[in-house]
């Protein structure tokens, strides 16, 4: 037993705080928008130049001039604003975005993230990922705990080319939640997914960590 | 002075193109791309282009047309997915791709247009992007030096222009267009609506006309949508 994609997104949504400006990556992170608690004000930033992303449009209200960073058609809200890519990344690089939730291929115990290329495969590019991890105040990575082969994706060092060095604050996998000290102070296992045991996490994790589960 | 307004995309590019030149083109994915000027660029037959933009079109659309016609030798972009021909050319070693983080690319273009030769950014520190570049410490943190970018010709898409070249963009079709407009030695803007000076509130102009040398009005926009996503009328939204 482990968390599903939706449950991982639900867990990531617990990192949201009232008033936050948040950038959500493609994949599981996009699902986090479905779990924003009622009554909490969260403004979603889309790095192609929008603050205040609205829901998908009705079929008869689709506008090709209004898309999110995943190229999906979206809508605006009364509080929305539009701006250039330079302004968008000024927000990101300048530390004005409170939280970024993004996917990963590998995370290291020092908070390094690899999520943009696999040597030998076609490189599609890093898009805005390197800017997001370098500039956003708090970075949460959501990813499967292991490769299909069973190999741990949470490692002492990433073996894939990095997206950022010492940039991840929190890692949420389908098995557990880890707090990472970017400054090199180590990793704390703070939560287990439903039906997951410490033993299973230990067997499937190459990175070193201290167990620091909250008392039930 | 002669009018900045040209009758069609081909005449708007006439005399501006030469083999081996650098062209910047606005847009994010296919949103806000100068689709008429791209077709005219393809039809011009100009070759060995270096193309700078966030993407290089996607299968059958946008800058893909110029790529598929064998006119591009080098690309500077942040993301090139959904583009099979680019993948094939790259795997065969027939095209050079320089990947830039999206924010670094936007800022390099902004800097180029603003006369700033280089700047330092946190983005890419400790990654392949920083290889071969100066890394310098400010306030105890490392930053990578990135250089400004300019182009021989910039192609941009705006929603509305007046005949002075003052531009207004629409929604997320703005994206890279405002910076690219500033970074071309010659900038051509294609627009959907052209009005007389005074018909755009000066306070609402996004790109002042000084950056725009030529203007063309496009018709019958394709505005291809890459990922059509909708919600049913009855259901609640996916986002607050």
Image: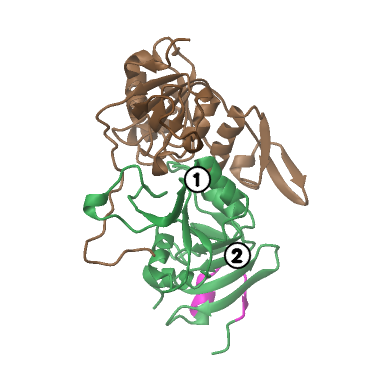
Chain colours: A green, B brown
- Of the 4 image quadrants, the one containing the N terminus of chain A is bottom left
Q: How far from the left and from the top, in percent, is residue B201?
A: 45, 35
Q: Which residue is mark 2?
A: A169
- Which residue is painted at 39% across and 24% down in the image? B196
Q: How far from the left and from the top, in percent, is residue A195?
A: 42, 82
In the image, which disc is placed on residue B121? Answer: none
* The stretch drawn in magenta includes residue B66: no
Chain letter of disc 1?
A: A
Neighbourhood count class around disc 2 (C-alpha, 10 Å): few under 14, some 14–19, many 20 upward? some
- Whether residue A179 is visible: yes
Q: Which residue is mark 1?
A: A126
Residue B112, quarter of the rendered image = top right
Q: Secondary structure at mark 2?
A: loop
- Which residue is painted at 53% across and 23% down in the image? B210
For marks 1 and 2, the one nearer the N-term is: 1
- Whether residue B46 is visible: no
Chain letter of disc 2?
A: A
- Of the 4 image quadrants, the one containing the C terminus of chain A is bottom right
* The stretch drawn in magenta includes residue A203: yes
Q: Pointers 1 and 2 in contact (CB under 8 A)?
A: no
Q: Which residues are magenta?
A: A200-212
Q: Disc 1 versus disc 2: distance between alpha carbons?
A: 20 Å
| Same chain assignment for discs 1 and 2 | yes
Q: Is residue A18 above or below residue B63?
A: below
B205 and B219: which is toward the camera = B205
Q: How far from the left and from the top, in percent, is residue A81?
A: 46, 50
Kindly give the residue lying farthest to the bottom in the view shown. Answer: A216
Q: How far from the left and from the top, in percent, is residue A160?
A: 54, 51
Q: Is residue B79 above or below residue A200?
A: above
């Amino acid at each position: 037993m482990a968390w599903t994609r939706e449950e991982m997104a639900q867990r990531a949504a617990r990192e949201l705080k009232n008033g936050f400006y948040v950038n959500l990556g493609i994949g599981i992170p996009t699902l986090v928008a479905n779990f924003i608690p009622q009554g909490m004000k969260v403004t979603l930033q889309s790095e192609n130049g929008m603050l205040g992303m609205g829901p998908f449009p009705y079929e008869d209200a689709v506008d090709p001039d209004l898309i999110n960073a995943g190229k999906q058609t979206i809508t605006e809200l009364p509080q929305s604003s539009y701006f250039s890519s330079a302004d968008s990344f000024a927000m990101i690089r300048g530390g004005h975005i409170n939280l970024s939730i993004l996917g990963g291929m590998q995370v290291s115990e020092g908070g390094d993230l690899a999520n943009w290329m696999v040597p030998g495969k076609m490189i599609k590019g890093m898009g805005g990922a390197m800017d997001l991890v370098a500039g956003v105040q708090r970075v949460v990575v959501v990813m499967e705990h292991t490769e299909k082969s069973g190999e741990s994706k949470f490692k002492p060092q990433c073996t894939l080319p990095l997206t950022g060095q010492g940039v991840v604050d929190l890692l949420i996998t389908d098995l557990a939640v880890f707090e990472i000290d970017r400054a090199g102070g180590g990793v704390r296992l703070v939560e287990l997914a439903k039906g997951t045991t410490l033993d299973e996490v230990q067997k499937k994790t190459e990175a070193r960590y201290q167990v620091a589960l909250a008392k039930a | 002075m002669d009018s900045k307004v040209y009758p069609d995309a081909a005449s708007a590019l006439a005399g501006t193109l030469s083999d081996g030149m650098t062209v910047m083109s606005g847009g994010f994915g296919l949103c806000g791309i100068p689709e008429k000027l791209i077709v005219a660029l393809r039809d011009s037959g100009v070759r060995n282009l270096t193309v700078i933009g966030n993407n290089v079109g996607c299968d059958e659309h946008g800058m893909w047309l110029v790529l598929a016609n064998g006119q591009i030798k080098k690309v500077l972009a942040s993301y090139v997915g959904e583009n099979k021909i680019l993948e094939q050319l790259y795997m065969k070693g027939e095209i050079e791709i320089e990947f830039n983080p999206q924010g670094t690319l936007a800022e390099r273009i902004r800097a180029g247009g603003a006369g700033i030769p280089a700047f330092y950014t946190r983005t890419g520190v400790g990654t392949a992007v920083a290889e071969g570049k100066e890394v310098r410490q400010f306030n105890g943190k490392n930053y990578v030096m990135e250089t400004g970018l300019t182009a021989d010709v910039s192609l941009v898409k705006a929603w509305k222009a007046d005949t002075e070249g003052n531009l207004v963009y629409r929604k997320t079709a703005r994206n890279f267009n405002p910076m690219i407009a500033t970074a071309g030695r010659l900038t051509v803007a294609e627009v959907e609506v052209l009005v007389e000076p005074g018909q755009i509130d000066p306070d609402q102009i996004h790109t002042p006309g000084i950056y725009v040398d030529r203007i063309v009005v496009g018709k019958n926009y394709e505005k291809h949508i890459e990922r059509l996503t909708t919600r049913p009328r009855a259901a609640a939204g996916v986002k607050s």
